[in-house]
Image (cartoon, grey):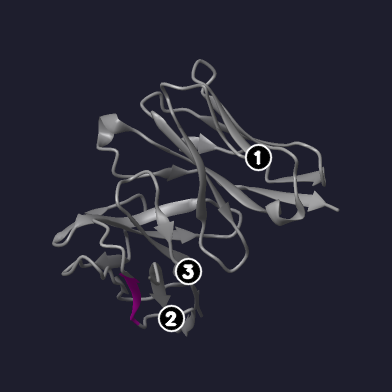
Amino acid sequence: NAGVTQTPKFRILKIGQSMTLQCTQDMNHNYMYWYRQDPGMGLKLIYYSVGAGITDKGEVPNGYNVSRSTTEDFPLRLELAAPSQTSVYFCASSPRVETQYFGPGTRLLVL
Amino acid sequence: DQQVKQNSPSLSVQEGRISILNCDYTNSMFDYFLWYKKYPAEGPTFLISISSIKDKNEDGRFTVFLNKSAKHLSLHIVPSQPGDSAVYFCAASGSNFGNEKLTFGTGTRLTIIP
């Protein structure tokens, strides 16, 4: 039981490039989330999903897209990377909203 | 608009003493509160939670207190141990708005001094 896995661990992007951050959970959780954490700040919700085929915007969705075609996977897409998207990204899953299980994070640097 | 606030960015405590981490919230619709702990280069892990129908919840060395009238909660760790050194996030959710999302505070870095 691996829990929540995220790939890659670290990535450097040039401005304007695109990439997909992968997130997979093997706990059969319905709820999945994407957060970003900037230095000295809390976790800001980007997008979330309450089940396969259902996604909704969080607090800071601009510049990102998501899809949820299966229960296990919840990829986050950056289409046109900007320096403001430099952050650490965390994926989480939950059987119910309160207790969320987090992945180890993806550190993204946009130059 | 920071609905969950942790006003102390850092806290240092001697090993064996009590650590008290504080959290304030502004949205009266929040009815469930959690504390998460985060080590460097890892994701946050759930520590303890409390429902608004309680004013205290205890789990081993960790106790969370909720004061609804003051919109304030605190996490007590006693006795503090070196392994408790981490960043602690307070989070809140509300059943009135679907209970689907957590709102996190900015975190408090706790350092336990041996």
Q: CA distance from mark 3 to mark 1?
A: 28 Å
Determine whether B88 is above or below A70 in the image.
above
Tag 1 and tag 2, C-beta contact below 8 Å: no
Question: Does mark 2 fall on the same chain as mark 1?
Answer: no
Identified by mark 1, the residue type is: Arg
Question: Residue A68 magenta-drawn?
Answer: no
Q: CA distance from mark 2 to mark 3?
A: 9 Å
Q: Position of residue A67 (x, y in %)?
A: 21, 67
Identified by mark 3, the residue type is: Gly
Relative side of B40 to B51, left or right: right
Say what secondary structure mark 1 lies in: loop
| Residue name at image x 78 percent, y 50 percent | B112
Identified by mark 2, the residue type is: Pro
Q: Which residues are magenta?
A: A18-24
Location of mark 1 (residue): B61
Location of mark 2 (residue): A8
Q: Position of residue A1 (x, y in %)?
A: 38, 70
Q: Quadrant of residue A72?
A: bottom left
Question: Residue A21 magenta-drawn?
Answer: yes
**In terms of sequence position, does the residue under pointer 2 or pointer 3 come before the other?**
2
Q: Position of residue B57 (x, y in %)?
A: 53, 30
Comparing labels 3 and 1, the label whose residue is closer to the camera: 1
| Residue name at image x 29 percent, y 32 percent | B95
Determine whether A53 is above or below B32 in the image.
below
Q: Quadrant of residue B96?
A: top left
Main SS, magenta region, reads strand
Say what secondary structure mark 2 lies in: loop
Q: Position of residue B87 (x, y in %)?
A: 63, 52
Q: CA distance from mark 1 to mark 2?
A: 36 Å
Q: Pointer 3: residues within 10 angstroms few (<14), some, or many (20+)?
A: many
Location of mark 3 (residue): A105
Question: Does mark 3 fall on the same chain as mark 2?
Answer: yes
